[in-house]
Amino acid sequence: MIYNFSAGPAVLPKEVLQQAAAEMLDWHGSGMSVMEMSHRGAEFMSILADAQHNLRELLAVPDNYKILFMQGGAIAQNAIVPMNLAGVKTEQPATLDYVCTGSWSVKSIKEAAKYGRVQVVADARNHPSGKFCSIPVPDSWQLSADAAYLHLCTNETIDGVEYHFVPRVNVPIVADMSSSILSRQINVADYGVIYGGAQKNIGPAGLTIVIVREDLLGHALPCCPSAFNWKTVADNDSMFNTPPTYAIYIAGLVFQWIKRQGGVAALEKINIAKAALLYDYIDGSTLYENRIQKDCRSRMNVPFFLRDESLNAAFLSAAKVLGLLQLKGHSSVGGMRASIYNAMPIEGVQALVNFMHEFQQQHSR
């Protein structure tokens, strides 16, 4: 059995891949592959409508929010967000508040600085360790009085830090949920904008989800390209330009799969159990450690280190032989990382824990 712990593009549900394979050459008797369809034809329009409807249902998206299917990933949205929201305030350049909790926050901040005056209201690197291992207490955040929005990354894929609370502020919250969306229940109304690349819990790379409150549309800076203007995309139902049709199709199949599992609430319970299984083993072991503060550990991305890092290569090699793949940590952090998204069964996490225990016993001194 192969278990893929890649951080993204990540594992997809097996039955989704099987259905896509069965429909590859002929979608529902149309005689066409989804890849070959006109994006404005009746066949694809039905795929798009179903995907939008099911995502809205899964997240209980309020009627006054638009769901946009875009391209470019979260990195592109790092620029698209300020280009669309920096015009909300009349002063130029606009003040843009950011909380820095990991590597993806850093990238977002760097990009946003091209379009407004970025204020880093809290930086997790101020922790005594100097590392991204916690979320600064909200009471310590130095919020601006006139910010257009507050941006945060709800789950830092690289560093393994996740918000388990929603900040209470007086400006719209813009949340990069690339690696946590659909893994846990959220109240969409707590946020002004939610965005994320699809390649973690939704589908293949190439699709970006944006959920935006309607009153935040129509404030784009003059420099914003038409294809990146949320109002233009919304007014054209994500069809202003050719959307990533096959990625939308796969995402739609994943949404259907989530509904069959019992919805987001059911998956959240499983995700809590998976994360607890792995963290509990790491905390009780003598060879491994996780360096993230316990109250903000990620359920989706679990970084860990071998206390004897000279064993790293042997660990990865032995894991690969057993079909436990993509466990090497990000190059900026080192160590190991197990990404345990929705499609990773608890059996995969148990297999990893079993291997880690055996490896520890073999190398105990």
Image (cartoon, grey):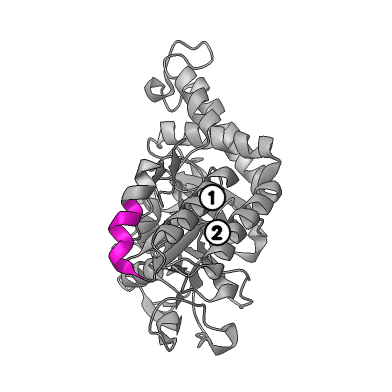
Mark linked to residue 235: none
Q: Position of residue 40 (x, y in %)?
A: 45, 26
Q: Position of residue 100 (x, y in %)?
A: 43, 76
- Residues at marks 1 and 2 touching, judged by CB atoms closer than 8 Å: yes
Amino acid marked by disc 1:
Val
The residue at which mark 2 appears reads as 278
| Circle 1 SS class | helix
Q: Main secondary structure of the magenta part?
A: helix
Residue at (42, 19) in percent of width and height: 33
**Depicted 258 relative to depicted 304: above or below:** above
Amino acid marked by disc 2:
Leu
Residue at (45, 60) in percent of width and height: 361
Residue 256 shown in magenta: no
- Boundaries of the magenta span: 308-316
Q: Position of residue 8 (x, y in %)?
A: 40, 49
Alpha carbons under labels 1 and 2: distance apart: 7 Å
Name the side, left or right, on which 302 lies relative to 215: left
Residue 314 shown in magenta: yes
As rendered, which of 174 and 16 lies closer to the eye? 16
Report if residue 218 is visible in the image. no
Give neighbour class at mark 1: few <14, some 14-19, many 20+ (Cα, 10 Å): many
Name the side, left or right, on which 14 lies relative to 34: right
User: Which badge, 1 or 2, is on the more N-terminal residue?
Assistant: 2
The residue at which mark 1 appears reads as 349
Residue at (68, 43) in percent of width and height: 263
Give neighbour class at mark 2: few <14, some 14-19, many 20+ (Cα, 10 Å): many
**Depicted 272 relative to depicted 247: above or below:** below
